Amino acid sequence: MTVPTSVAMNAYATAARQVAQGAAGDAAPSAGGGPAFGDLLRGVVDNMATAGVNAQEQAVSAIGGKGDVVDMVTAISEAEATLQTVVAVRDNVITAYQEILKMPI
């Protein structure tokens, strides 16, 4: 299933806002002056949870006849895009960790 362009752009815009907010001093700064990696990941996981809850609420309201099916599909697509992004980041972190373990001391 492909993700609509607007959903992907919303996800990237949210990530960019989080990085900008962290650089402005909302998150604990790291040694490099930007947001701490853990704080950035915490924000991404929080957004993933929020997107999942929103998708669930939209689905329940659509099933109950009170919501719009288009809103439900959009919310589910956003949750799916967020989950795919988190899984991709996780896979890259694991790959990087495995590469570090392979380095000779």
Image: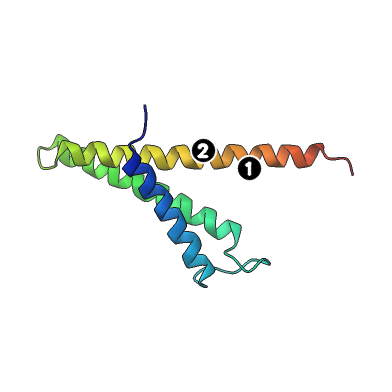
The x, y position of residue 58, in whole percent, is 22, 42
User: For the point 47% across and 50% down, which residue is it?
Assistant: 45
User: For the point 53% across and 57% down, which residue is it?
Assistant: 40
Label total for image: 2
For residue 95, above or below residue 35: above
Display coloring: rainbow
Label 2 packing within 10 angstroms: few (<14), some (14-19), many (20+): few
Judge by depth and name the residue closer to the eye, 4 or 83.
4
Say which element carries label 1: helix
Q: Is residue 43 left or right of residue 65?
A: right
Judge by depth and name the residue closer to the eye, 2 or 25.
2
Instruction: List the single residue furthest toward the left.
Output: 65
Instruction: List the single residue furthest toward the bottom.
Output: 25
Judge by depth and name the residue closer to the eye, 64 or 87.
87
Image quarter of the N terminus: top left
For residue 6, above or below residue 26: above
Q: Is residue 48 left or right of residue 4?
A: right
Q: Tell me whether circle 2 and circle 1 mark residues in contact (CB < 8 Å).
A: no
Mark 2 to mark 1 CA distance (whole Å): 10 Å
User: For the point 79% across and 39% down, which residue is it?
Assistant: 101
**The quadrant where residue 103 appears:** top right
The x, y position of residue 78, in whole percent, is 34, 42
The x, y position of residue 3, in whole percent, is 36, 34
Q: Which residue is mark 1?
A: 93
For residue 17, above or below residue 89: below
Instruction: List the single residue furthest toward the right.
Output: 105
What kind of residue is marked 2? Val
Say which element carries label 2: helix
> Which tag, 2 or 1, sits closer to the chain's start?
2
What kind of residue is marked 1? Val
User: For the point 44% across and 39% down, which residue is it?
Assistant: 83
Q: Which residue is mark 2?
A: 87
